[in-house]
Amino acid sequence: MIQWQSWLLWGFLATLLLTTVSAVTQGLGFTRMNIPYLLGTMLTPDRDRARVYGFFAHLGIGWAFSLLYVLIFRALGQADWWHGALIGLLHALFVLVVVAVLLPGVHPRMASEQHGPEAGRVLEPPGFLALNYGIQTPLSVFVSHAVFGAVLGAFYRLH
């Protein structure tokens, strides 16, 4: 049985921490990728509002993903920081290899690798491993997702 209060609390806090780590790595110049902004520009062309909408979308998506982590912990029969970090690393790998490549196909304001920018599609596509946003972007994504999983694994209570 899922411990709903534990999931709600630690899923929320882990998502806030992931978002914070991502913002810090962007602010320090390790990457140009800003996932909340990318999500927000799917909802509105207004750049300022996109940051706000994207933040809340990212928070909701992260919270939903934390439930997947909890289900994996339940299937494993244990939750600890290193299992969480390992799941986070696999999650990051999926994001970098699959989601980053598919994103231009669903994002209304993102150019594609094959067609380039157009009048309404001005955002640069992330490319494989999101390397178009900087050589250190994969490291940023791996670290932020490992922290996300480690926090969930360390603090979520199975019983």
Image (spheres, grey):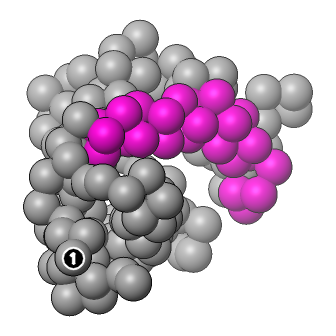
In the picture as drawn, the residue positioned furthest to the bottom comes out as: 5
Q: Main secondary structure of the magenta part?
A: helix
Label total for image:
1
In the picture as drawn, the residue positioned furthest to the top comes out as: 135
Within-10-Å neighbours for mark 1: few <14, some 14–19, many 20+: few
Q: Is residue 113 left or right of residue 41?
A: right
Which of the 4 image quadrants contains residue 120?
bottom right
Foreground pick, 80 / 31: 80
Label 1 SS: loop
> Horizontal and vertical percent for residue 63?
36, 72
Question: At 53% across and 30% down in the image, what residue appears?
Answer: 93
> Which corner quadrant holds the C terminus?
bottom left
Let me know if residue 42 is in the magenta part: no
Foreground pick, 156 / 43: 156
Question: At 49% across and 34% down in the image, what residue appears?
Answer: 90
Q: Is residue 128 above or below residue 92?
A: above
User: In the image, what residue type sits under mark 1?
Assistant: His
> Horizontal and vertical percent for residue 76?
43, 52
- Can residue 69 be seen here? The reply is no
> Which corner quadrant holds the N terminus?
bottom left
Q: Report the span colored magenta.
A: 83-108
Which of the 4 image quadrants contains residue 143?
top left
Q: Which residue is mark 1?
A: 159
